[in-house]
Amino acid sequence: MIAVQIENLWKEYRLGVIGRGSLAQDFQSLLCRLRGKEDPNSEIDIMGGGTTERVQNKRFFALRGVDLEIEQGDIVGIVGKNGAGKSTLLKILSQITKPTKGVIRASGRTASLLEVGTGFHPELTGRENIYLNGAILGMTRREVRSKFDAIVDFSGVGTFVDTPVKRYSSGMYVRLAFAVAAHLDPEILIVDEVLAVGDAEFQERCLGKMKEVSEEGRTVIFVSHQMNAIESLCTKGVIMEEGRVSYQTDDIRSLIRRYLVGDVEELDGVTLWTNDKGVCQSPYFTPNSFGLYLANGEQAPFVVRNDEDLEVRIEFEVKMEDPALCIGFAVYDEDGRKVFLTCETDAQDGKPERVRAGRHVSRTIIPRHYLNEGLYTVKMAASLVNRMWLINLYEEDVDFRFRIQGGLSHSAYWTKKRDGVTAPVWDWQLEKLGE
Amino acid sequence: MVGKSMGSPNTDTPERWAVEITPHRRIFSVPVGEIFRYRDLIYLFVRRDFVANYKQTVLGPVWFVIQPILTTVMMVFVFGKIAKLSTDGIPQVLFYLGGVTLWGYFASSFNKTATTFQSNAKLFGKVYFPRLVAPISVAISSLITLAIQFGLFLAFFAYFWHNGKVEPNATVFLFPLLILDLAMIALGMGLLFSALTTKYRDLVNLLAFGTQLLMYATPIVYPMSTLSEKYAWIISANPITGVIETFRFGFMGAGDFSWGMLGYSTGVASLVFLLGMIVFNKVEATFMDTV
């Protein structure tokens, strides 16, 4: 049975109008137009004057004809880059805003969880907030009462339940908030990235709870950037791109691969990323290029062998020195699993050398016989540690890809790809023991 | 899709949709059933407003009574003793307290309704519930405040009645209608305002002192009888005038009462209320895109 049916859904936002809030400004604009002067409040054209498919006549189409059918009992993961339209879709599904065109039909009560702790009042006690928050999420007082003990148990706030929540630690606050939400039981549950809260153990419990919900035959729609959560939870996946559903499948692993690595066939790209688009023009760090090189210093081809050392080079410029600067990259395999993350500051002996102002190249070796056969994506990340991302590993795509084929080992017994994330060749010592 | 659906019993029956989300909405559709389903939320909102307001205060709910008493004392002093305005022969304390009680109800429900979208923007942006729940709970908490303050008024009233200073008449029984009129005007105007403030933030500034000005355009601190013909019509055009004068006439036997005035007030109140609901309904749908 179909639980949710989305038909040709469009959402349009008018650019510029959003920022205009005062009556005086409207008058000012009107006066200026009457006198033939330039309107001082005319909106800034964020798209640089151009018209793209998504921006037309100062209208921005956040969703452009989304069609989707979701079966009852499915846990659907929606992935997509920032700005792909995921949040807009969730907002419409949650009835926070209306679509411009199209229709959504749902077969049962829906509840949405776009944020934990919505409507929590700091002055009220944990107990009072459980009731209030439950009601905001659509539960009756009776329902809350019947689940009250379970909620308190799940949250682990214990004896603090009669303390005002403003005295809670932030962890307790979030746990209590999620506990309320976790005990909702609508037929259709819409969840946005809320798992990104709490410690690892709590996240585990949240995932478990969501799984439980779907095993009871309820439908869950889940948006996340965490591929692990998507993989362990979802039974169906959807990729959104530019306001449309670009791909959907029951095979979550293939979905993640596709999302992280792109369409494999189109991949005959080079192993070099250059900063043509002007990504990250920060005075702390501006990358110029990021690429893969062979031992002889040449640019690596797309397909390399596993018995070659591979050098990753990052060329960059620093205008303003900052001791917290950390540059690195992560390698993902074709299933979207992160194989490892390494940073320029990881130097093995003593303190790493400080990065001074000026242009630099930073390099490191991915040793031979370390990775496995397959397709790899290498993504650059940069940050001021504990302060801010300069290049967000999880959201930005400063990356290149390469494929390892052949050269697995010299052994006659090991000729084709072995299972496993890596395929290291290690030394084995053979010693003959005396009789 | 996955075979999970095979086992579900409803596979063959035509599907009935519980929820349908479309761009359009009828111009006047109040989701009564839905609001009823959320009645617990209304209750909890009202409770939150009371409880949160008086946590960590010494006097707590006594503030409900202190406020009208102090205002009345001020008014007796300024308008009664200094300006020597007439009170139509009604004891000054009772005259001002009555006005203050009714006006206080109007002003608080109007002001709080008018800022519905601003004060709930965060909530409205993250979770759906019928938006009318917010103004309704405001109206109810104002009503409770009114009940407490009206109790205070009744206490003074009983005292003066006992001493033969005032003489109520049958018009007293119109009191529920008067409150209904006030509620409709406050809610209607509040909803209109709240809809407009999503676009024009300036109106928020107008709100506070506009309410203040409106008080002087309503016979709160003076009776209608002191006005000359020349100005009386302006004040009479204010739909709240009829309500206040009827109230005074009923309880204290002085003031201008006519069925015409009351009818006018009720008519305007219903109209404003209806208009407020229509505009609120319209704005509610896309409000999150503009705030």
Image: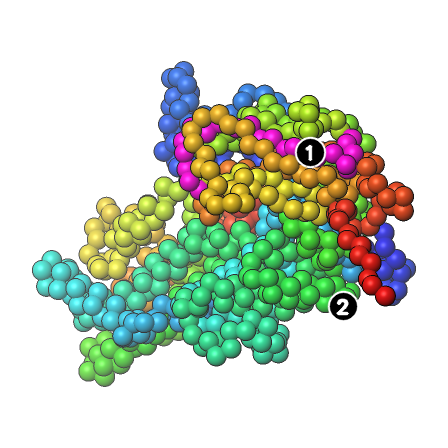
Say which mark, if any, is on residue A216.
2
Mark 1 belongs to which amino acid? Answer: Leu
Q: Is residue A91 left or right of residue B101?
A: right
Task: Name the subunit of mark 2.
Answer: A
Mark 2 belongs to which amino acid? Answer: Glu
Dot 2: element: loop
Does the magenta run of residues contain A309?
A: yes
The residue labelled by disc 1 is A310
Does the magenta run of residues contain A291?
A: no
- Please tell me in which quadrant of the rendered image residue A11 appears: top right
Highlighted magenta segment, given as a residue range? A303-324
Q: Nearer the viewer, mark 2 or mark 1?
A: 1
Residue at x-position 50% and y-position 64%: A171
Residue at x-position 32% and y-position 45%: B206
Q: Is residue A403 above or below residue A340?
A: above
Mark 2–mark 1 Cα distance, whole angstroms, equals 50 Å
First along the sequence among labels 2 and 1:
2
Q: Is residue B13 left or right of residue A64?
A: right
